[in-house]
Image (cartoon, grey):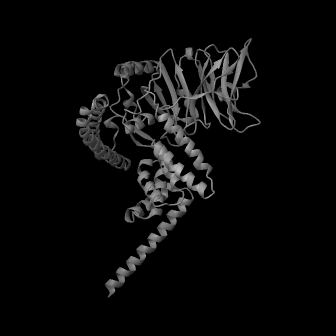
């Protein structure tokens, strides 16, 4: 009898603790403390996978802690089970994963349903516009070789741009004007006759681009650039002007941006002193995060831009790339969508290296600029993101022997996946150019290879997660 009483008491205690844990987790969730709430919801959704709210809560926690890929299936379940407003979170996850068609379809259905109920959602409308911009840009991802990346403090990131004097000078308004209240980027042309920077005007709370010109050795009073650049209600900053004196790059969070700051380009019409309508330069430069400070050093044939994608608060990643003489984009129709998304996200800079000789030459030029002997510049073995703060490039970077072993398995699976991917590319090209007989013969082979590719991709994601778990324990 005592045994049953004890078991009953233990069961009751467990239920009470679970209820308390759920209540605490919901409180943390409501307060936006997703990291602390996440473990409880993860346990609950695994024990009760059909609970719609558990799927939503855990999915949102995963999304807001930087794990959109893990969040996706749980948010999809929440939407299928019609949890209120779950479509917004699902669309956000899809955007982060560059699944723009699904994001657009989800939001259009959600907004149409709201309209039937005579409700509106400005947040959903804004996200829909962002998703449409993403869908448009993913169809024109530029083929660009990114040769290096470095994570630095945002506060002084401009100091890491090593552009030559022939390209101009980059500094901050703090350095130039001696202001202590800001560190906005300021650019001076190579002839040192014009400078560009951003500031908040007295009649507006947003940043506007300004220009000043030098006359008789003195800088003129800065004036604001035209409205078609400084779009009302948008921040405009991080200017750079090419030596031609005509091409202007800057960053803006206008409605035409994909998310946060995007990089735009415009050109100066010198005949009537006006500027053409700015154009978004697209992916991979722009992302759902903040992307800015695009600069080209034609003398060294190197380009630079900064992004806070996948970075912790206060950090930015500076990417160095080889500028293209003419823009060439990946084929949206003929490129595997998963691969295209990774290229657009800059999942791995090594994936962009289509010409090893050009990359090596560019790395030597960069090493010379940085006053490092060119023969000491290492070719990275790989690039693997461990967490928001650490990316590994060599096996010796691993602390955990178990994680290192798991990563070796990851590379084996990755190699098998790449072989399958390459075979599929060949089969698809043969299919596209073949007659009806060839297409009938290839169709079955393509389907089998696609199934193998899917299985290997899932295995790759699984092993990658295992590597991160093992290494982050240390």
Give 373 or 6, whichever is nearer the viewer.
6
Q: Position of residue 103 (x, y in %)?
A: 49, 46
Q: Residue furthest top?
A: 216
Q: Residue furthest bottom?
A: 1
Give 34 or 353, whichever is nearer the viewer.
353
Q: Residue furthest front?
A: 436
Give 472 or 242, whichever is nearer the viewer.
242
Q: Residue at x 59, y 47 (%)?
A: 125
* Number of numbered labels in the structure image: 0
Q: Position of residue 226 (x, y in %)?
A: 70, 26
Q: Position of residue 300 (x, y in %)?
A: 48, 16
Q: Residue at x 40, y 31 (%)?
A: 349
Asked whether the viewer can see residue 275, the reply is yes
Task: Tell whether 48 sits left or right of 266.
Answer: left
**Position of 368 relative to 424 (above/below):** above
Q: Which corner quadrant of the image does residue 51 belong to?
A: bottom left
Task: Tell whether 207 sits left or right of 418.
Answer: right
**Position of 385 relative to 123 (above/below):** above
Give 335 or 314, whichever is nearer the viewer.
335
**Position of 474 relative to 168 (above/below):** below
On-image quarter of the N terminus: bottom left
Q: Residue at x 62, y 16 (%)?
A: 245
Q: Position of residue 434 (x, y in %)?
A: 28, 29
Asked whether the viewer can see residue 347, the reply is no
């Amino acid at each position: 009898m005592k045994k049953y009483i004890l078991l009953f008491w233990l069961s009751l205690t467990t239920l009470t603790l679970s209820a308390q844990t759920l209540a605490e987790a919901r409180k943390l969730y409501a307060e936006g403390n997703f990291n602390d709430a996440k473990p409880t919801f993860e346990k609950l959704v695994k024990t009760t996978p059909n609970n719609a709210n558990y799927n939503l809560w855990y999915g949102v926690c995963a999304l807001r802690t930087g794990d959109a890929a893990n969040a996706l299936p749980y948010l999809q379940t929440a939407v299928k089970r019609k949890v209120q407003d779950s479509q917004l979170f699902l669309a956000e996850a899809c955007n982060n994963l560059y699944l723009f068609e699904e994001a657009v379809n989800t939001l259009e259905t959600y907004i149409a349903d709201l309209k039937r109920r005579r409700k509106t959602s400005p947040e959903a409308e804004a996200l829909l516009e962002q998703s449409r911009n993403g869908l448009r840009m993913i169809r024109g991802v530029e083929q660009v070789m990114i040769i290096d990346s470095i994570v630095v403090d945002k506060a002084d990131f401009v100091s890491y741009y090593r552009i030559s004097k022939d390209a101009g000078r980059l500094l901050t308004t703090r350095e130039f004007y001696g202001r202590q209240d800001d560190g906005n980027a300021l650019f001076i042309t190579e002839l040192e006759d014009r400078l560009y920077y951003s500031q908040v005007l007295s009649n507006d709370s947003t940043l506007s681009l300004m220009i000043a010109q030098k006359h008789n050795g003195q800088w003129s009073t800065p004036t604001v650039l035209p409205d078609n650049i400084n779009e009302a209600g948008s921040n405009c900053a991080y200017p750079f002007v090419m030596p031609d004196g005509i091409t202007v790059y800057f960053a803006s969070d206008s409605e035409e941006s994909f998310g946060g700051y995007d990089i735009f380009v415009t050109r100066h019409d010198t005949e009537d002193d006006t500027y053409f309508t700015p154009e978004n330069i697209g992916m991979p430069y722009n992302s759902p995060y903040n992307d800015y400070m695009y600069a080209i050093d034609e003398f060294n044939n190197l380009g630079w831009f900064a992004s806070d994608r996948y970075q912790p608060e206060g950090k930015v990643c500076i990417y160095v790339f080889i500028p293209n003489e003419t823009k060439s984009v990946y084929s949206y129709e003929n490129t595997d969508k998963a691969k295209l998304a990774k290229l657009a996200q800059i999942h791995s800079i090594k994936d962009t290296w289509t010409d090893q000789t050009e990359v090596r030459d560019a790395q030597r030029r960069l090493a010379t600029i940085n006053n490092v002997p060119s023969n000491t510049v290492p070719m990275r073995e790989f690039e693997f993101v461990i967490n928001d703060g650490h990316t590994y490039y060599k096996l010796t970077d691993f602390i955990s022997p178990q994680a290192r072993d798991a990563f070796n398995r990851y590379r084996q699976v990755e190699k098998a996946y790449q072989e399958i991917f390459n075979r599929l590319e060949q089969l698809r090209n043969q299919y596209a150019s073949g007659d009806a007989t060839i297409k009938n013969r290839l169709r079955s082979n393509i389907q089998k290879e696609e199934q193998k590719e899917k299985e290997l991709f899932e295995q790759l994601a699984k092993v990658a997660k295992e590597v991160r778990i093992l290494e982050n324990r240390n």
